[in-house]
Image (cartoon, rainbow, N blue to C red):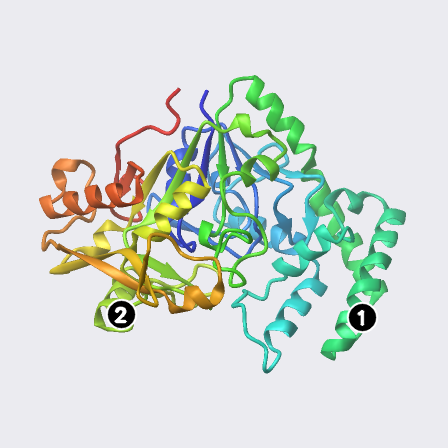
Amino acid sequence: MANVVVVGAQWGDEGKGKIVDWLSERADVIARFQGGHNAGHTLVIDGKVYKLSLLPSGIVRGGKLSVIGNGVVLDPWHLITEIEKLRGQGVDITPENLMIAENASLILPVHGELDRAREGQTGVAKIGTTGRGIGPAYEDKVGRRAIRVADLADAATLETRVDRLMGHHDALRRGLGIEPIDRAALLEALAAIAPQVLPYAKPVWKVLTEARKAGKRILFEGAQGALLDVDFGTYPYVTSSNVIAGQAATGTGLGPTAIDFVLGIVKAYTTRVGEGPFPAELFDADGDRLGERGHEFGTVTGRKRRCGWFDAVLVRQTCATSGVSGIALTKLDVLDGFPVLKICVGYDLDGVRLDYLPTAADQQARCTPIYEEMEGWSENTAGARSWADLPGAAIKYVRRIEELIQCPVAMLSTSPERDDTILVTDPFAD
């Protein structure tokens, strides 16, 4: 059976939630492989809205196993809150349908405090984080001072881990004018949350290996977007983990041979939240119209998203770094009614044309978009479920995108409703 990785191919907010939900109905296992509770998914199922930020999208569907892999940093208090919220919406969540990697690192209150203190420093360029402690938690992971899910089961180990953590964090907190960590209070909070989290803890790598051997279909679910990847994104305005498809293997404990199809989720225009370069950003009425029609506000933060025309240069780049097999193009209906559409096909950097986004931050900031114009359409594409439902100009727009990004469209989404989808290539086909 084919296993599929879903990644965002822009700066996040591409509509992964709907696509993952659409695919999860056909999958047996849905696994999150990176990020934390800083990126949200909104699912609309039978008119009911579910907002997720940590749990895999498959959790709202019965008969599926949802997995949080070791590549995720886990806020245990948020986890329990999100579980209870979904239970209140009638979703059944038990250790039988939700498993958490024993070796996943925890996000602690001290991480959020450090995150927010850094962003609040005057005279320091802001990264635009959500302030939820994701970055500091990953720092502790690679610094070998993280507390992991398995540590919650042993009080002596937990105390040793907390002491090592404090040796690093208290020095940082002094420099930022924050009170030292209250060791007793932190240990008490961890002891209280442990019994609620540990029932879900499992050797996820083993569970997934057995599922694969049994011929189960595995859907690997990414968060954020490839342009926020810590290595290949617009550094330093990025998230603190690898977002590209290769992380699906590392972040779950399965090797790269487990991946059969990479589906890149791509919005029919471009948005980003927070700070950082955005060559095709619009500051005019067209940009406002995209934001209003697309309801461009962050699921987790509520922050207004910056909007711009479709940037084929960036998407071609992310399709290459993630080895994308096909894209799911979303929110095509937002472009209904624009008489003229523009696509960024290159950048001008000090008079030199580039077909990629340079790595150096100062060069990224100086890149200006080179546009190609296309005729828009006045017809309504919302709810279209076949190519025959689309106006000719919309089909030409989609085909031109395929040419420019050098990657085929596998799926086309025309509304938040899961059935308003045109399937071109089945990612799960053997």
- Give the x, y percent position of residue 191: 80, 53
- Give the x, y percent position of residue 180: 81, 72
Identified by mark 2, the residue type is Asp
Viewer-proximal residue among 307 and 420: 307
- Give the x, y percent position of residue 393: 11, 48
Q: Which residue is drawn at the image coordinates 74% and 47% (left, top)?
A: 148
SS label for mark 1: helix
Q: Which callout, 2 or 1, points to the residue nearer the camera?
A: 1
Judge left or right: residue 243 versus residue 149.
left
**Residue furthest toward the bottom?**
122
Question: Which quadrant is the C terminus positioned in?
Answer: top left
**Residue furthest toward the right?**
156
Q: Which residue is drawn at the image coordinates 33% and 28% (left, top)?
A: 426
Q: Which residue is drawn at the image coordinates 71% and 51% (left, top)?
A: 141
Q: Which residue is mark 2?
A: 288
> Which mark, by number, is residue 171?
1
Distance CA(mark 2)–CA(mark 1): 45 Å
- Tell me where residue 422 sits by quadrant: top left
Q: Is residue 42 above or below residue 171?
A: above
Q: Is residue 46 above or below residue 340?
A: above
Mark 2 and 1 residues: CB-CB less than 8 Å, in contact?
A: no
Identified by mark 1, the residue type is Ala
Between discs 2 and 1, the one toward the N terminus: 1
